[in-house]
Amino acid sequence: MWKKKLYSSSQISAILSRSVASTNFSSSISISHCCNSSIFNSSSLFPSSSSSFFGRAQGKPFHSGRGLFFPTSISNLTRDNASFLRYENLFCSLSKSDEKYHCWNCGANADNSTPFLFCEACRSVQPVNESTDYFQIFGLGREYKVKVEELEKKYKDWQKKLHPDLVHSKSQREREYAAEQSARVIDAYRTLTDPLSRAIYLVKLEGVLVDEEERITDPELLAEVMELREAVDEAEGTRALNEIQVQLQEKLRYWSNSFEDAYLNKNYEDALASIRRMTYYKRTNEEIVKKL
């Protein structure tokens, strides 16, 4: 329905046509995407009721096919506005009724209860679906606390199906799918098993911009970081370094818990503050590991 309305506009039909023409229709998921274009930055092109215009529920955010996050108000569509963010990998959640997964090889319909990375019917590896986030890959909800043992088990189960060495005699197409899927599962596992990486990933999924190279501006944190680095530089022997390492682990646990509380309460400002602390404590710990 929304495509008809998009094509009825002479101002954007050419852009939409180019986007549709460049879409890879070999994917195993059939969903509707909107193109990413600078023309969408102009609020004058859209009426105030643009939620229904885009074919989404009123008040719900809209994700385009190329990683743009559109806020609930079209009038806020400006690159200078904090509510307009661009990510290379921002995942959207689709309802089960919108998902139409099928195997590229045998055409079998997928079981929507699990991520469709592998077809059980013909034992074929499927192409990567970017709308499946890292938590979904392992059958988890978007929660900060994870059981690493269970995560490791599911990771090994996936690699028994997706590892490139298992499809070396199959088609070039499936070998490429296996390489991509295996690499993505590895990245998902590494991200979710590390408390800091998991925290950063969670807030990014919520549309919060995280500057991982941000400089310290908090005077209290700056003073603490400098003191820790001096202690590491002046430490004599393994015992002294281990004592500092124990203190860092305690700080990491404290701020990890602080992040979880902030995330559960959707207090993203405090969540980002916790992430900054965890980032510098982790870096200091890595310096100690190098010296040990």
Image: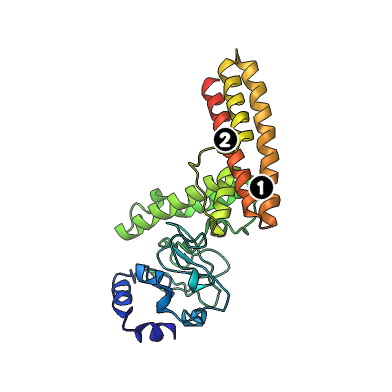
Residue 230 on image: x %, y %: 58, 20
Residue 37 visible, this angle? no
Residue 220 visible, this angle? yes
Query: For the N terminus, which image quadrant?
Result: bottom left
Q: Is mark 1 on a helix, strand or loop?
A: helix
Q: Nearer the viewer, residue 30 or 229?
A: 229
Q: Which of 161 and 272 is in front in this view?
A: 272
**Toward which corner of the image does residue 250 lie, by quadrant?**
top right
Residue 122 on image: x %, y %: 43, 66
Q: Residue 108 has which mark?
A: none
Q: In this view, does 139 lie to the left or right of 40?
A: right
**Toward which corner of the image does residue 268 lie, by quadrant?**
bottom right
Q: Name the residue under label 1.
A: 259
Residue 214 on image: x %, y %: 50, 42
Q: What residue appears at the point 54 percent right and 50 percent down from the top-left corner?
A: 155
Q: Residue 280 has which mark?
A: 2
Residue extending furthest top? 236
- Inspect the image, locate mark 1, and give the three-letter code of the amino acid beneath it: Phe
Query: For the C terminus, which image quadrant?
Result: top right
Q: What residue appears at the point 63 percent right and 44 percent down from the top-left corner?
A: 274
